[in-house]
Amino acid sequence: MPLFDETLNQRLAELREQHLFRELRRVDSAQGPRIEIGGQTFLNFSSNDYLGLANHPALKTAAIHAVEKFGAGAGASRLVCGSLASFHELEESLAAFKKAEAALTFSTGYAAALGTITALVGKDDVIILDKLVHASIVDAAKLSGAKLRVFDHNDLNDLEKILKWANEKSRLTPHASRILIVTESIFSMDGDCAPLRKIGALKEKYGAWLMVDEAHATGIIGQNGRGLADELGMSDQIEIQIGTLGKALGASGGYICGSRALIDFLVNRARSFIFSTAPVPAAAAAATAGIKIVQSAEGETRRHHLRQRVTELISNFKFQISNFPGAIVPLIIGDENEALAAAAKLREQNIFVPAIRFPTVARGAARLRITLTASHSANDVAKLCAALPPTPHASRRHEPTRPT
Ligand SMILES: *Cc1c(COP(=O)(O)O)cnc(C)c1O
């Protein structure tokens, strides 16, 4: 035991030295524009609850009703003990919302990525990822055993180069070999958008499959908040749409939308779905209520408020930052310690903005990741702007792109 702890403490010391040590901060209130930490109230610019639904009365009521009807726990995996009505209602709502034939929900977005990618590709296949995709996709790709290639962020030339290579390789492989491209629509730590239409054209040209993670776009962009795939009319062209119920939708869980064949296949093959207890029915019911609000007039109003707040924040900057289509506005600082210091300075003024560091982003690309929500007021944003470093280092590694 002492030796075990000693080893770990040594590793922890290394993390501290590199300014990469992380710790949990206990919050004693619900998510919202203000949170309680250590008996103090902080203005909160850290949450992915972009539309302010996590603490919405309609979601809470839906969760309470589900608890009253179905209890607190789900009992077992949905294939083992039967599949609660809450999940079926949620999946029907999701499929309609995303204009897909069918949907399947998982306990988290992470589990959805893990189960789906490992079910779809294996060692004879190639998986091609944008350099900035979420850790869940990277982990899934590694676990799948497929040959993994990474293209520079939003770089279509680099993607095509890899597609050419993969196509050549698959022609030489005796087994049927598949190529899966994975990207996000709005990127989680950079707030920019993928050139999805052009990626769609490339995937058609090379006969690849396309998976798009809409974790930060669902509920936020496109008509009724359906996301970028729908906005571009690409829902039919993208084999696998993935996302989370835990961000703009205000609840918890992950989803896959696509064809009936895809969903039936995942029920049979996605190990994180099969070998895991179903989520609590309250989470599914809350997500269903979230999807309803997102598509309603109230959802539209909330998206409008969010857009206003984002515009106020970016118009405060002297430098020209181009479009941030979602709720995420990163201020790239670079040095890990400087980013920590900037976040600490904001906390002294009771403003909570996370310093995002390696391994969430590349080494030397640390940043303040500001997230705005529909529940913030113009005054909240004005306070943040007044507290931010006078000229935030906004030297972005790349320009955010508009949806194309
Ligand atoms: C948050 C996130 C996930 C994981 O979703 P969870 O439901 O939080 O597990 C997947 N992909 C992206 C891009 C994310 O930002």
Image: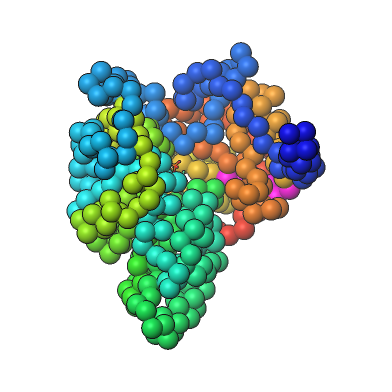
The residue nearer to you, when weighing 220 against 265, is 265
**Left/right of residue 308 with respect to residue 22 in the rendered view:** left
Q: Residue at x 43, y 73 (%)?
A: 124
The image shows residue 65, relative to residue 273, as above or below, that is above
**Left/right of residue 199 with respect to residue 105 in the rendered view:** right
| Magenta-drawn segment | 330-335
The image shows residue 391, relative to residue 124, as above or below, that is above
**Left/right of residue 178 with respect to residue 36 in the rendered view:** left
Q: Residue at x 67, y 36 (%)?
A: 22
**Is residue 331 located in the magenta-colored stretch of the structure?**
yes
Q: Residue at x 52, y 22 (%)?
A: 34
The residue nearer to you, when weighing 57 against 164, is 164
Magenta stretch, main secondary structure class: strand
Q: Residue at x 30, y 33 (%)?
A: 284
> Hey, which quadrant is residue 179 in on the image?
bottom left
The N terminus: image quadrant? top right
Q: Is residue 319 visible?
A: no
**Left/right of residue 122 with respect to residue 102 in the rendered view:** right
Q: Position of residue 192 (x, y in %)?
A: 49, 53
